[in-house]
Amino acid sequence: MKKIAVYPGTFDPVTNGHLDLIKRASYFVDKLFVGIGVNASKATLFDLESRMKMLKTLTREIDNVEVVSFKGLLVDFANEVGAMVIIRGLRAVSDYEFELQLALMNRRLNSQVDTVFLMPDERYSYLNSTIVREVARLGGDVSSFVAPLVADKLKEKFKGE
């Protein structure tokens, strides 16, 4: 039986913390689906196609990773791809309560899917997409937070602001 997992997120933009978790999660499973959640009520900086393209480019050398998008419930997406594990990142204690609630709700919705929490490398423990977007918007250097491809895309987005 293949071990299949999903690592869901908005990835707006994908950070080095996300990439760290993708690489480490890929060691534990036969197949890792990086699922970009589509939420019409959530305004994003980058459209879905751009986020897909960036993630596919940045993960292309990890053979067992596939980047896909999904709509609806995460547990339904997990079922569709045959995943029994959801990967979630925990950066700090402040993440724990929210992530625990999500994990328990997902378990209630589908008891066949478990959540596994991974902590990112400590270099990325404070990092999130919102902070990266704000630093980039204000003209700060984000090169230590994101891949060069993403840094360039952020510069393009905020050029002239």
Image: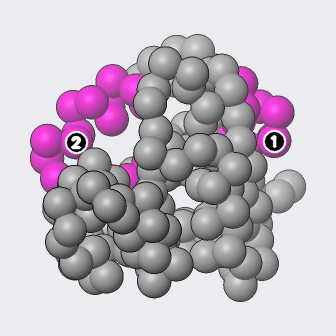
Looking at the rendered structure, the number of numbered marks drawn on it comes to: 2
| Residue furthest top in the image | 109
- Residue 106 in view in this figure: yes
What residue is pinned by disc 2? 95
Image quarter of the C terminus: bottom left
Which residues lie in the magenta part?
74-103
State yes or no: residue 50 in magenta.
no
Which image quarter: residue 114? top right
Q: Are the residues flagged by discs 1 and 2 in contact, CB closer than 8 Å?
A: no
Residue 81 position in % (x across, y down)? 81, 41
Query: Is label 2 in a helix, a strand or a loop?
Result: helix
First-in-chain label (1 vs 2): 1
What residue is pinned by disc 1? 81
Q: Which residue is drawn at 81% across and 41% down?
A: 82
Left/right of residue 90 with respect to residue 66 in the rendered view: left
| Residue furthest front in the image | 160
Image quarter of the N terminus: bottom right
Left/right of residue 74 with respect to residue 10 in the rendered view: right
| Residue furthest left in the image | 93
Query: Is label 1 in a helix, a strand or a loop?
Result: helix
Vertical arrangement, residue 83 with respect to residue 42, above or below: below
Residue 110 position in % (x across, y down)? 63, 20
Q: Which residue is drawn at 61% across and 32% down?
A: 38
Residue 62 position in % (x across, y down)? 70, 79
Query: Is the residue marked by circle 2 packed among few (<14), some (14-19), or many (20+) residues within 10 Å?
Result: few
Q: What residue type is labelled 2?
A: Asp
Q: Looking at this view, is 88 or 156 the one in front?
A: 156
Q: Which residue is drawn at 32% across and 61% down?
A: 160
Left/right of residue 78 with respect to residue 44 in the rendered view: right
Q: Residue at x 82, y 33 (%)?
A: 80
